[in-house]
Image (tube, grey):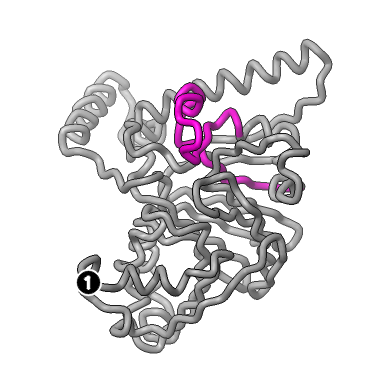
C-alpha cells in the first residue's frame, strides 16, 4: 500500500441527515424495483446506485490518509466522530495514541465534529494539530468553551500540540510528504499535496477555483500537477456556481477542465451542497458526464490532446487505494 484515502464526510456547509420521509419513500421504491427485477437479493443490492441505496452521505468534511507507516486526518467535520470511534479499537482507546490532524481552514463545517472526537478526551493521547493559519490554538479554545460546548478546554484529557505549516513548503509526516497550497475561498484556505512511494494525492476542498489557468495559479499550480488522485470541491452544479460568485465553491466541470489539462489520473468530487438531495447530486453527476463526453468528442474532432480522466462523485465511506 502506498496511500489509502478514506472519505468520512463529503457534505459541505452543514451536516445533512436523511429525513424519515425520504428513507420511507426510498424503501418503497427499492422494494418495488426488486419485485419487478426477478433477481436474487444480493445481485439486486449490488446493482443499486448510490442515490437508491445508502445515498452520498450527510457528514461534513473529514478524510484520513494512511501509508504503510503513518496516518493523517484532514479536517474535523462531523465525519470525524465516526473516525474517532473506530480509532478507539487501537492505541487511542488505551490512551497511548498519537494523532496528526491537519486543517484546511476553520469554517464551522470543518470544525463541527471536533467536540465529539472521543480520542481528544482520553488522557495519555497526543493530538498534533497543524495548519497554515496561525490562530489554530485560539480556535480550539473557542470551540471548547461555554456556551458553545459544556466541556471546557482545560478539561480535555489528551495533550494537544499546535504546529504551524509554511505555505508551499513541504513537511514530512513519517513517510508521507505534505505541502500546503492556497485555494480560492473566503478566508485563507489551504489544500494539501500528499506524496508517498511515488504516488500523489491532492486535496482541493474548499475552493471556487477562480484561478484556473496556469498563469493565474502561479505558485499554487503544483497542487494540480503530477497528481494520481485529486479530491475536488463540487458543491454546486455549473449553473449554480455561475450564480454564486465569491461563495467559495466550485462545480465538477471546473475540476475536470484542470484534470484534463494537467493529466490528473483520477478525480473524486465532494463537498456536496446540503440542500441537494441524493437524486440532485446524481443528476449533477450525469450532467458532468455529458460535459466530459462532449469535451472528449470536441477534442477528437479538432485533434486536441485532451487527456482522459477517471472520475466520480464521492460518497461517505468511499476508500481509494493508490
Q: Nearer the viewer, residue 285 or 191?
A: 191
Q: Is residue 136 left or right of residue 279?
A: right
Q: Is residue 230 magenta?
A: yes
- Residue 113 is situated, as x and y percent measured from the top left of the image, at 34, 61
Displayed quadrant of residue 110: bottom left
User: Residue, x 26% and y 44% (percent of image)?
Assistant: 17
- Under circle 1, the secondary element is loop
Along the line of sight, which residue is nearer the eye, 178 or 24? 178
Relative placement, left or right, of 150 versus 290 is left
| Residue depicted at 37% across the width and 55% down the height | 108
User: In the image, is residue 284 above or below residue 322?
Assistant: above
Badge 1 density bin: few <14, some 14–19, many ≥20, Cα 10 Å: few
Q: Is 124 placed left or right of 177 in the picture?
A: left
In the rendering, at what x and y percent does residue 255 appear? 61, 35
Q: Which residues are magenta?
A: 226-254
Quadrant in the picture for the N terminus: bottom right
Percent across and percent down for residue 271 are 45, 43
Residue at the spot of label 1:
146
Seen at 77% across and 38% down, the residue is 215
- 285 horizontally vs 78: left or right: right
Residue 6, above or below 237: below
Residue ID at (46%, 25%): 243
Amino acid at each position: 500500500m502506498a496511500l489509502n484515502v478514506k472519505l468520512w464526510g463529503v457534505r459541505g456547509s452543514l451536516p445533512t441527515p436523511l429525513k424519515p420521509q425520504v428513507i420511507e419513500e426510498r424503501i418503497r421504491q427499492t422494494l418495488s424495483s426488486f419485485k419487478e427485477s426477478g433477481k436474487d437479493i444480493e445481485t439486486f443490492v449490488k446493482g443499486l446506485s448510490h442515490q437508491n441505496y445508502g445515498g452520498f452521505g450527510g457528514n461534513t468534511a473529514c478524510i484520513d490518509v494512511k501509508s504503510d507507516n503513518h496516518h493523517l486526518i484532514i479536517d474535523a467535520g462531523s465525519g470525524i466522530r465516526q473516525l474517532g470511534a473506530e480509532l478507539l479499537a487501537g492505541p487511542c482507546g488505551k490512551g497511548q495514541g498519537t494523532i496528526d490532524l491537519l486543517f484546511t481552514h476553520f469554517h464551522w463545517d470543518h470544525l463541527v465534529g471536533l467536540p465529539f472526537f472521543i480520542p481528544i478526551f482520553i488522557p495519555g493521547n497526543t493530538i498534533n494539530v497543524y495548519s497554515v493559519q496561525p490562530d489554530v490554538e485560539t480556535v480550539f479554545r473557542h470551540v471548547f468553551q461555554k456556551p458553545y460546548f459544556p466541556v471546557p478546554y482545560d478539561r480535555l484529557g489528551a495533550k494537544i500540540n499546535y504546529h504551524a505549516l509554511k505555505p508551499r513548503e513541504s513537511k514530512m509526516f513519517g513517510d508521507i510528504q505534505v505541502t500546503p497550497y492556497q485555494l480560492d475561498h473566503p478566508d485563507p484556505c489551504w489544500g494539501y499535496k500528499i506524496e508517498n512511494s511515488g504516488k500523489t494525492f491532492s486535496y482541493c476542498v474548499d475552493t471556487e477555483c477562480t484561478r484556473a489557468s496556469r498563469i493565474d495559479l502561479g505558485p499554487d499550480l503544483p497542487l494540480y500537477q503530477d497528481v494520481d488522485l485529486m479530491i475536488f470541491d463540487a458543491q454546486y452544479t455549473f449553473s449554480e456556481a455561475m450564480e454564486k460568485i465569491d461563495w467559495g465553491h466550485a462545480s465538477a466541470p471546473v475540476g475536470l477542465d484542470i484534470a484534463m489539462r494537467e493529466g490528473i489520473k483520477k478525480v473524486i468530487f465532494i463537498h456536496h451542497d446540503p440542500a441537494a438531495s441524493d437524486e440532485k447530486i446524481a443528476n449533477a453527476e450525469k450532467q458532468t458526464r455529458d460535459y466530459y463526453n462532449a469535451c472528449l468528442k470536441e477534442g477528437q474532432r479538432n485533434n486536441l490532446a485532451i487527456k482522459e480522466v477517471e472520475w466520480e462523485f464521492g460518497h461517505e465511506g468511499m476508500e481509494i487505494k493508490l
